[in-house]
Image: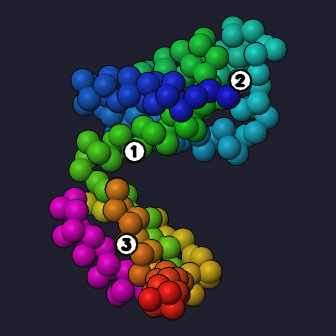
Amino acid sequence: MISSTISRRYAKALLSIGQEDGQYEEYGHNLQEFVGFCSTNEEFSRVISNQIFSAADRKKILEIALEKGSFSDVIKNFLRLLIDKNRIRAIKEIADYYSILTDKVLNIARANIITARPLKNKALDKLEKALVVLTSKKVKVDMKEDKSIIGGLIVKIEDLVLDGSVRAQLERLRVSLKRSEYN
């Protein structure tokens, strides 16, 4: 397994190149496209990341895939480098971290919102607007449902966690009642 530190280094290096030539957003789209291709073609992914095959053979297979896509030359060279350094199996982790880095450059905050039930569009719009005001950034929302929170919602954005779930309120009440028992 390739450490996340190494994956982050590759993502940072690619972002640096992208910022120099102004193409960092395109590179992010290219990485996501390649990751998507790998996830839908698992055999391809296994072959290019298997060191049983020589780097030259793996590159030949990669080239066939690259011909079918509209990848930039920088991304093509980046993927070839990952094969040379036996890091291609970390492409998803590299792409995910690259996406986080580009969001920072573009002043976008990522908000993970957990609800017991889906939010109505009007409520979600209000929440997004409040998060924009709170962070002074554009906000990318990732919604998840978790019935165990009973009701309310949990918002995780950057280093901030806002837990307005019924489960958390019940837990605070339980702790408060326990404290009052001993006083």
Magenta highlight: main SS: helix
Query: Which one is in front, 38 or 179?
Result: 179
Q: Which mark is residue 48?
A: 2
Per the rendered image, the range of residues in magenta is 119-137
The residue sitting at 33% across, 41% down in the picture is: 102
Locate residue 171 relative to residue 98 in the image: left or right. right
Q: Which residue is label 3 attached to?
A: 162
- Is the residue marked by circle 2 packed among few (<14), some (14-19), or many (20+) residues within 10 Å? many
**CA gap, disc 3 to disc 2?**
42 Å
Mark 3 / mark 1, whichever is N-terminal: 1
Residue 174 in view (yes/no): yes
Is the C-beta separation of discs 3 and 1 under 8 Å?
A: no
* CB-based contact (under 8 Å), mark 3 and mark 2: no
SS type, badge 2: helix
Instruction: Where is residue 24? Give x, y as percent.
Output: 33, 34
Which numbered disc, 3 or 2, marks the residue that appears first in the sequence?
2
- Which amino acid, by three-letter code, is at mark 3? Leu
Q: Examine the image and state in which quarter residue 68 appears.
A: top right
Q: Residue at x 41, y 81 (%)?
A: 164
Q: Which residue is mark 1?
A: 100
How far separated are the C-alphas under marks 1 and 2?
Answer: 25 Å
Label 3 and label 1: CA atoms lie apart by 21 Å
Amino acid bearing label 1: Ile
Locate the C terminus by quadrant: bottom left
Q: Nearer the viewer, mark 3 or mark 2?
A: 3
Compared to residue 25, the image places residue 164 above or below, namely below
Q: Where does the N terminus fall, quadrant-wise?
A: top right
How many C-alpha atoms fall within 10 Å of the one at disc 1: few (<14), some, or many (≥20)?
Answer: some
SS at circle 3:
strand
Position in image of residue 109 (x %, y %): 31, 56
